[in-house]
Amino acid sequence: MKELEEKLVKFIQEQVQQAGFQKVILGLSGGIDSALVAYLAVKALGKENVLTIKMPYKTSSKESIEHANLILQDLDLQEKTIEITPMVDAYFFMQAEATSLRKGNYMARTRMSILFDQSALENALVIGTSNKTEILLGYGTLFGDMACAFNPIGDLYKKDVWKLSRYMGVPQEIIDKQPSADLWEGQTDEEELGLSYQLADEILERVVDKKQSLEEILAEGYEESIVQKVIQKIKASSYKRKLNPIAKVGAVLGRDFIF
């Protein structure tokens, strides 16, 4: 874990320096992903260069706020709280038929809008907090929680997030709790995904990293319907992992904006 920690700390330092910044800013949800990123950022930049924002909604769990405060106290971080209830409810007052999914996506994008606005105010880069499992399964909101200037944990499966968090001293109650985006009352990640993170990571490693065929994975005893479900999620969310396609119509076709 020491080597991984050092690699990610160096990555954060390089990204911030290359962009000409000194500080980073992140949304602190009380969950393990943002907690780990906060610990890595403090290690890389010092606590004075890590800014955090809590952005609760009226249905946010008391536990999430308590755990966010636990991280703030442990790392002695600068913090703001910006309540998103008034802005979210103002929009959905006009969208009474909206589903929980729509509301959750809107909340995620509202939070990211706030983060980028505050980043301009504080002259700080928005640092990402999405892990590899979520990214591959498409379990994130485009231009919401998946948006950032750079992401230090985007190549860590959830199991690696847990391991590194233990190594870096993230409070045990945050490590042990049921993962949740806390977008609506009682929501959990694994219930919404339809499988556990442990099982998802095992299948993703075989599909993505080891490039195993379906037959090879099934030969190890995995249920075909679950494996197919994971593969379908990867395929269906591929657009979330790509830059917006741009139609090339200039005189020099295929030329990118690189100087």
Image (cartoon, rainbow, N blue to C red):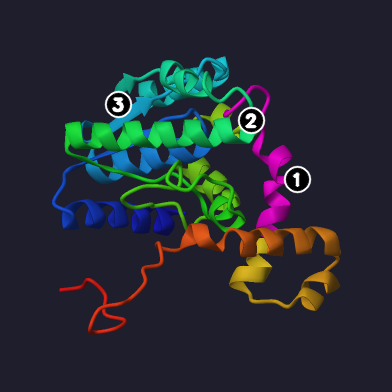
Q: Nearer the viewer, residue 173 or 110?
A: 110
Q: Nearer the viewer, mark 2 or mark 1?
A: 2
Q: Residue 185 in the image: state x and y as whole percent.
A: 64, 22
The disc at residue 251 is none
Q: Nearer the viewer, residue 67 or 54?
A: 54
**Residue at (81% x, 77% y) in the render:** 215
Residue 194: image tag: 1
- Residue 223 in view here: no
Question: Dot 1, crowdedness within 10 Å: few (<14), some or many (≥20)?
Answer: few
- Asked if the magenta segment contains residue 75, the reply would be no
Q: Which amino acid does the dot numbered 1 rest on?
A: Gly
The amino acid type found where label 2 is placed reads Ser
Whether the magenta-drawn stretch holds residue 200 is answered as yes
Q: If you read the primary sequence from the N terminus, does the residue marked by circle 3 or circle 1 appear first?
A: 3
Q: Give the image location of residue 223, x and y in percent.
A: 85, 61
Q: Nearer the viewer, mark 3 or mark 1?
A: 1
Which is nearer the eye, 140 or 14?
A: 140
Q: Decide: few, some or many residues near mark 2? Use Cα within 10 Å; few <14, some 14-19, many ≥20.
A: few
Looking at the rendered structure, which numbered label has been put on residue 77? 3
Find the residue positioned furthest to the bottom: 252
Image location (x, y in percent) of residue 257: 22, 71
Q: Is residue 149 visible?
A: yes
Magenta span covers which residues? 181-203
Disc 3 marks a residue whose amino acid type is Leu
In this figure, which residue is indicated by the disc labeled 2? 100
Q: Along the polypeptide, which appears first: circle 2 or circle 1?
A: 2
In the picture, measured across the screen, residue 114 lies left or right of residue 103, that is left
Q: Earlier in the sequence, mark 2 or mark 3?
A: 3
Q: Nearer the viewer, residue 186 or 242?
A: 242
Mark 2 vs mark 3, foreground winner is 2
